[in-house]
Image (cartoon, rainbow, N blue to C red):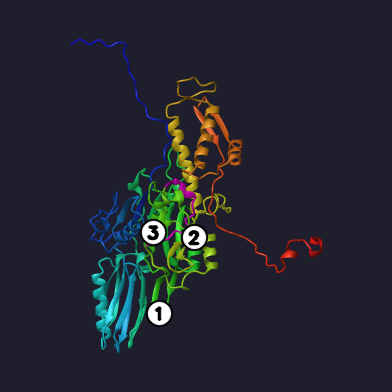
Amino acid sequence: MTTISFPKTTTTLTGAVVQVSNEPQRILVLSQKTAAGTATSGALNTNIQADADALAGITSMGAAVVRAVRRANTDTAVDAIFLDDASGTPATGSIAYSGTATAAGELTAIVGSQRNNKLTIAVAVDDTATEIGAALVAAITANLRAPVTGVNTTGSVALTAENDGTEGNGIHLEVGDTVAGITQVVTAMTGGATDPTLTGIFDVVGDTRYQAPIWSWSNDLAELVTFVDDRFNVTDDIQDALGHVAASDTLSNHLAVAAAQNTFINYHAQKLISSATTKGNDRAELPYVLAGYAGALRSVKLTVGAAIGDLNVGQSGLDGTGGPALASRPLANTPVNALLPSTQGIGWTRLEIEQLNDAGMSVMGNNKAGNKVVLGQQMTLRTTDAGGNPDDSFKFVNYFDTATGIREFYDSNLRSAYAQSRLTGGDLVAGRPMVNQILFEAKLTELFTILSEAGFVLTQAGQEALNFFIANMVVVPDLQTGSIAWTVKTPINVQLRNLNGTIEIVFDVVESSGVTETEEA
């Protein structure tokens, strides 16, 4: 069949010119597995949902961290690297009972986590210490996710960590309630030694972007430090990452760690409690689990579309949905809904919190009402510049996330706008992808303006801020090398940290107004 079609027409559809969004958040959990876990030691496990118990072993450190992350954040993608135990030593401790019950009642014991591993033991009149110890062992065995095993010897229950290594020394032990005739004594977990070899643990990651690596070994930060430092200011890519770690220790030991580091790590310092009935940290939780909560809450707030209204205190408005704009909203006072408040008076004092914050360390604790656990100011250990001078540029997590969010937005959008563009020192030719100094300056200004609007609110809005930006912009094209060197200064929005007011008490409103009664007459 002969068909005549004239004139010939070809109409091509092209996509709209749109902003390039920042890369989705991704969490990387790094922890230990038990022999029961099916994961290959050192392998990268991607897109973990509810399968961490099988991959790492249900009683393992790794499974506990992933469960915490998923409890606080169901929106952000989670990958994990689990390592086998080394040929090390598990930590051991004990809960010992003595006497014979002269009344009925209940005893409680926490073996790791107040939320997940609080055990209740029913006690009858005439129950012996041996019988109570046997009941505790039975409760530990029935608690499938307990991080310890127990063996009873005439009422003294020897506890052994499920994973070998030093992190078992931080397992929280606590007894509560009383029964007439029964005495309870807690011996802290100790003796855990020889962590897995951590060198090269990140090799399987390649160039995958992880904004929130969650690290389980508070006693050895070297590999994490190298990872986050090497990913800051990467050539021809955006790889910025902020590590999350938690540890239970004394104030002086925490401050010593801070003094030895200057890096992009959010370090949660928990207070070590040691009394007759409590051995562990003031949050009654596994330290590596606390690191999981901190990383998960930060990531969910930055995850586009995540429903986070329950994590905001006060007015949410547009902040009820996660995204890059949440980088400039303070993380302080964010509820850690999965944790239970601790006993009043056992945590850090205000002065101690200030010391930790000044050193770049973070805390979480009870709110003023004592009915919720909330994040305190979220800090990083990056507190000085390359010359060792005090530098607050990245000391606060919000500063870090705001600055890296701005950098990523510029990088992605400039890369998209000029992917196949000619550089010229002359005028632009209509219909031809080209860029000169004037157009490039206009593009930088456009992106700054977008970053100040409701979708981001990372840079300051208004004519004064825009004038400052333009006045401090430097753009230098080099046609010989086909490059543009550019520098801008971006005034950012910051977290409100202090309210300093003065209230003057007066007694005579006439005199206080500066007008005398005679003058009024």
Q: How far apart are marks 1 and 3 (CA)?
A: 29 Å
> Residue 51 sits in which quadrant?
bottom left
**Res 361 label:** 2
Question: Mark 1 or mark 3: which comes first in sequence?
Answer: 1
Q: Residues within 10 Å of mark 1 (few under 14, many from 20)?
A: few
**Res 521 label:** none
Question: Mark 1 or mark 2: which comes first in sequence?
Answer: 1
**Percent x, y of residue 295:** 40, 55
**Percent x, y of residue 331:** 47, 56
**Res 276 label:** 1
Q: How far apart are marks 1 and 2 (CA)?
A: 28 Å
Residue situated furthest front in the rendering: 521
Viewer can see residue 189:
no
Instruction: Judge from the rendering whether residue 397 lies leftward or rightward of residue 58; answer left or right.
Output: right
Residue at screen point 26% across, 72% down: 140
> Residue 358 sits in which quadrant?
bottom right
Residue 393 against residue 252 in the figure, above or below? above
Q: What residue type is labelled 2?
A: Met
**Percent x, y of residue 178:** 35, 83
Specify the segment rendered in magenta. 323-337
Q: Does the magenta stretch include residue 332?
A: yes
Q: Helix, strand or loop at disc 1?
A: loop
Question: Mark 3 or mark 2: which comes first in sequence?
Answer: 3
**Res 293 label:** 3
Q: Distance between the residues labelled 3 and 2?
A: 16 Å
Q: What residue type is labelled 3?
A: Tyr
Q: Residues within 10 Å of mark 2 (few under 14, many from 20)?
A: many
Residue at screen point 42% across, 77% down: 275
Please identify, in this view, whether the residue under mark 3 or under mark 2 is nearer the observer. 3
Q: What residue type is labelled 1?
A: Ala
